[in-house]
Image (cartoon, grey):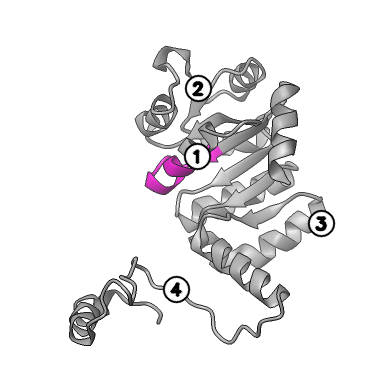
Amino acid sequence: MILPKLQRRQANGNPIKVGWVGAGRMITGAICQTALMKGMANSVICDIRPEAAIRAHTINGVKREDILITNNASQANDAIRQGRPVVTEDSRLMPELTVDCVVEGTGVPEVGAEVAFRCIQAGKNIIMLNVETDVVIGPILHQMAQRAGVVYSVSSGDEPGLITELVDRYAGLGFEVVAVGKTPLPWPSWTSTPRPRRWARMRERWASTLTSW
């Protein structure tokens, strides 16, 4: 179970230190969720827009004056050891920082590839909220991580991770999985739109946005 392990880390004053690359909408949501958890700490947030990274800290109760803004690895590591939140613009710093894992969520394939590659080389666990990178070179990065003895994984909250969890769960329960897919939008349920004509109109309106069905 995850909870007892996190509670032990919290009690021992040894939270999982997370470094985040990107401070857009999706990854800021993940940062907010982590801020609510015991036994985890948002140690570093990296973004080319420092104000976005600062906001991701401050909306979770961190005072702006308590944040260290730096592109210097030594200064950042001193702050991390003191439990002081850090903001940086330079993603190349991440492999040098004393964090337990790095979450890459820029959505930029080249940036994601470089961050993941450097982190694996430095012995850092890497979690991808960047499906754009994962679909291109994810298997290669996974093999590299296995050889390096670190974790390379997609995230549970992103669609690929959720689909994988569903397949694993129901195939493990003995069901035959015959198809897997997703829609890009939260489609209304059949029960909320029971009339066929109404459903047909909605389907026609959103047809241009479909990538799978």
Q: Quadrant of the C terminus?
A: bottom left
Q: Which residues are magenta?
A: 20-30
Number of marks in the rendered image: 4
In primary-sequence order, the first of circles 3 and 2 is 2
Mark positioned earlier in the residue sequence (1 or 4): 1
Crowding at dot 2, Cα within 10 Å, few <14 / some 14-19 / many 20+, comes out as some
Q: Amino acid at mark 1?
A: Gln
Residue 28 among those drawn in magenta: yes
Circle 2: residue type: Thr
> What residue sits right under mark 3 in the picture?
147
Please name the residue shown 39% across and 73% down the image. Answer: 183
Q: Earlier in the sequence, mark 3 or mark 4?
A: 3
Tell me which label, 4 or 2, sits earlier in the chain: 2
Q: Residue under circle 1?
A: 33
Q: Amino acid at mark 4?
A: Lys
User: Which residue has dot 2 on it?
Assistant: 70
Q: CA distance from mark 3 to mark 2?
A: 32 Å
Characterize the local packing of mark 4: few (<14), some (14-19) or many (20 or more) Cα atoms within 10 angstroms.
few
> In which quarter of the view is residue 2 placed?
top right
Lower position in the chain sequence, tag 3 or tag 1: 1
